Amino acid sequence: MSRKNRIRLFAYTPLETGGIYEATEAQTHYLSNVMRLGLDDEVFLFDGVHGEFLATVAQKTKKNLILKVNKKIFDFEKAPDVWLLFAVLKKDNTDIVVQKAVELGARKIIPVRSEYTTASNIKPERLKAQIIEAAEQSRRQDLPELGDFLPLEKLLKTWPQNRKLVYLDETGQGRSFSACAKQMKEPVAFLVGPEGGFSSKELELLKSLSYTSAVSLGHRILRAETASLAALSCWQAFCGDWK
Amino acid sequence: MSRKNRIRLFAYTPLETGGIYEATEAQTHYLSNVMRLGLDDEVFLFDGVHGEFLATVAQKTKKNLILKVNKKIFDFEKAPDVWLLFAVLKKDNTDIVVQKAVELGARKIIPVRSEYTTASNIKPERLKAQIIEAAEQSRRQDLPELGDFLPLEKLLKTWPQNRKLVYLDETGQGRSFSACAKQMKEPVAFLVGPEGGFSSKELELLKSLSYTSAVSLGHRILRAETASLAALSCWQAFCGDWK
């Protein structure tokens, strides 16, 4: 099995070389029944704190699978300090945004309720499971944090003012990404509105704050989920760790 | 109804001020039964050649709807000369790539069969319908062309050599996007492999060609559809018309 295709799982308890990891029930089912691993088969494990380890199946019963943690293969590394705040969308599109934000290296993902947000709730457990799955597949070491689902105004009231908040302005008032790339150093956050955009009241509020700036992604209308991915991609390429 | 929410449709026949447009059967159903437009209600029309026009409902029967083309509101404008070549994915992900490539301003979209491509066919009519829908919603004036579904090798044999072909190299051999942005001037094309990446034979072939270059989008593994969107976004922001 090539390095690439090897199984990589998130460990819910801390890992160390020489230690063991007891797979959860769902992981046991996946490793035993879906992937049909046997004794001594290899798995990569990461715990979001200590890095990534090579482990082998050491014990296996029907309901229980224990892995021996053999050696560290990657040191722990955090994704760059960029957050994504996005107005919650219909279920499938919220899923897409969260999954892609993990791949694109957002350190924190915050679902937001804005005036024109039509979705009224999120399922944090479901989103957390998706974050873990996307982190496993994207081979990132850290697990992005999922922020609480908050109304935009409330979120802004407690905003850490040293973090620049860049909102995507569909009204054409924002500067181009390339023109402001140099002012988007870490720590930074992107804020993407819902399909209907921000209300004029929200735009006024955002404009009035000292830590915000407006950016435009061209004159074609992007769907909200596309805008989230585009902003994170451009940032990683020109300010983040794709450089 | 605000400018933003107004209906915008692709016209399958050429438009001119003072002329008429006969809606297709599907458009008639949409305008009459879904959107419940009446006489004199306004619609935006674009034909992919002459620009965008404001039209009003002039005649309406059960099966037929005729629009009067009142005035031109936007001149015709082509998206920048960037193509997207992507190894065909599972149906839903192919749909996502095509829809987003339209939003992100690709001028031509070419589905490709590579060695590790698992999907064996595409439905061109279905994809063309999605291209039209995405163009309507993204407010772009031109309709991106859908290329034939071809094996990668065959496509490379007839490649227009003045067009730079930038392939996304997951092996880490590529240069960073920001480092090669200046060498990616129009006309340019991005090539994105399938989930399994390119085969070593394909990578050798790509490397050997004079008009290609390899780019890397960081060390996290991106899903194929994410890589397509990220490449187009970065290009538009730093080389294309988001500048």
Image (spheres, coloured by chain):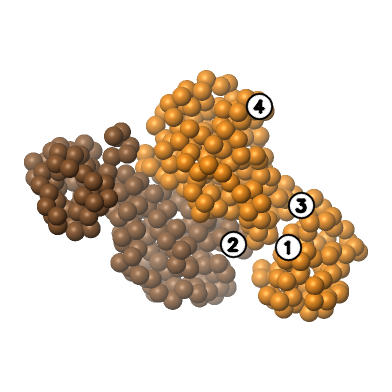
Chain colours: A orange, B brown
Tell me which numbered mark, 3 or 1, is placed earlier along the sequence.
1
Q: What chain does badge 1 belong to?
A: A
Task: Kindly identify which residue carries mark 1.
Answer: A9
Task: Give whichever of discs 4 and 3 has the lower sequence position.
Answer: 3
Q: Which residue is mark 4?
A: A158
Q: Residues within 10 Å of mark 4 (few under 14, many from 20)?
A: few
C-alpha gap between disc 3 and disc 1 = 11 Å
4 and 3 marks on the same chain: yes
At label 1, which amino acid type do we have?
Leu
3D distance between C-alphas at marks 4 and 1: 35 Å
Disc 1 residue crowd, few under 14, some 14–19, many 20+, Cα 10 Å: many
**What's under tag 4, amino acid-wise?**
Thr
Where residue A192 appears, as percent x and y from the top left, is: 51, 38
Labels 2 and 1 touching (C-beta < 8 A): no
Helix, strand or loop at label 1? It is strand
What distance separates the C-alpha of mark 2 from that of mark 4? 40 Å
Q: Are marks 3 and 1 on the same chain?
A: yes
For the N terminus of chain B, give its image quadrant. Answer: top left
Q: Amino acid at mark 2?
A: Glu
- Along the viewing direction, whichever of A68 and B198 lies nearer the viewer: A68
Image location of residue A133, percent across then percent down: 65, 59
Q: Are marks 2 and 1 on the same chain?
A: no
Check disc 2 and report its element: helix, strand or loop: loop
Q: How far separated are the C-alphas under marks 2 and 1?
A: 21 Å
Q: Chain of mark 4?
A: A
Q: Residues within 10 Å of mark 3 (few under 14, many from 20)?
A: many
Q: Tell me which residue sits at (78%, 59%) in the image.
A: A11
- According to the picture, the residue beneath numbered tag 3 turns out to be A48
Can the viewer see residue A234? Answer: no
Determine the CA span between mark 4 and mark 3: 27 Å
**Where is mark 2, residue-wise?**
B170
